């Protein structure tokens, strides 16, 4: 398959020095790209600002902001069979970006924000026969929110995890996830390496693709 994978955080700049972001390091998305390429899939990886080497045989596009990631996804989606939206996209961005560094004495104690576009919701009308995979990084019980996103975004597979659990959050080499698909029971996976999690996700994706092919 031709897979389009997003990974890492986005940075929403306040000025050339300061920005809003999150703790994502891109390890899960890069593991997916690595394992997918190793299986022979054609992989395009859209990466936010991360300190990771490009996996072998993977085409990489670097972006910074949520708006740049959305533009890249829109441009690359027509050539893809599946979109795996693993990136931790910032929900909000500053209402205005200052072109030069603000002096501390000039800064307001209040930062005005506006919402970033939801990339999966934005490209949902262009889904057509493609498979869409989303990620829900939550704290506490992630399943209720993950199921809501699965339905509202029209996804074929949702990967949910509780990032407050040891070894299952950002900047780790392991993860503990639950896989959700429409009309199927939740599949809870034990703590395992992110490469192994990537393999389990790709197994499910390939099964979904084979099912869709039989329907056609």
Image: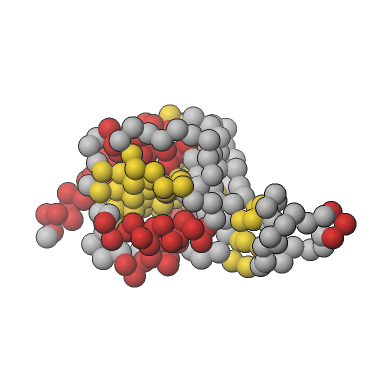
Which is more toward the observer, 124 or 44? 44
User: What colour-coding does the image apply?
Assistant: secondary structure
From this view, report whether residue 83 is shown above or below residue 34. Answer: below
Considering every residue shown, the one lying at the far front of the view is 100
- Quarter where residue 65 is shown: bottom right
Viewed as shown, does residue 63 lie left or right of 16?
left
x 78%, y 56%: residue:
102
> Residue 208, how many percent across, how many down?
23, 50
Considering every residue shown, the one lying at the far bottom of the view is 125
- Quarter where residue 13 is shown: bottom right
x 51%, y 65%: residue:
117
x 17%, y 49%: residue:
210
> Residue 79, how many percent across, how many down?
26, 56
Q: If the image is split into quadrants, where does the C terminus sit?
A: bottom left
Q: Is residue 88 visible?
A: no
> Residue 196, how many percent across, how many down?
37, 31
x 49%, y 51%: residue:
63
Count of marks placed on residues? 0
Viewed as shown, does residue 79 lie left or right of 101?
left
Viewed as shown, does residue 129 lie left or right of 7?
left
Q: Is residue 23 visible?
A: yes
> Residue 41, how many percent across, how many down?
24, 41
């Amino acid at each position: 398959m031709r897979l389009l994978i997003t990974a890492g955080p986005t940075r929403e700049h306040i000025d050339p020095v300061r920005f809003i972001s999150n703790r994502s390091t891109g390890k899960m998305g890069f593991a997916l790209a690595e394992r997918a390429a190793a299986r022979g899939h054609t992989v395009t990886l859209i990466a936010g600002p991360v300190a990771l080497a490009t996996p072998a045989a993977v085409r990489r596009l670097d972006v910074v902001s949520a708006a740049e990631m959305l533009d890249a996804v829109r441009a690359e989606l027509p050539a893809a069979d599946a979109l795996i939206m693993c990136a931790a996209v910032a929900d909000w961005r500053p209402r205005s970006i200052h072109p030069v560094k603000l002096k501390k004495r000039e800064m307001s104690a209040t930062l005005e924000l506006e919402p970033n576009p939801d990339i999966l919701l934005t490209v949902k009308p262009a889904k057509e026969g493609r498979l869409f995979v989303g990620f829900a990084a939550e704290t506490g019980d992630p399943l209720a929110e993950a199921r809501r996103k699965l339905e509202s975004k029209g996804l074929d597979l949702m990967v949910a995890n509780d990032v407050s659990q040891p070894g299952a959050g950002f900047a780790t080499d392991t993860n503990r996830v639950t896989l959700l698909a429409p009309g199927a029971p939740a599949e809870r996976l034990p703590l395992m390496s992110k490469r192994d999690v990537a393999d389990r996700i790709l197994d499910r994706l390939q099964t979904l693709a084979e099912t869709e092919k039989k329907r056609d």
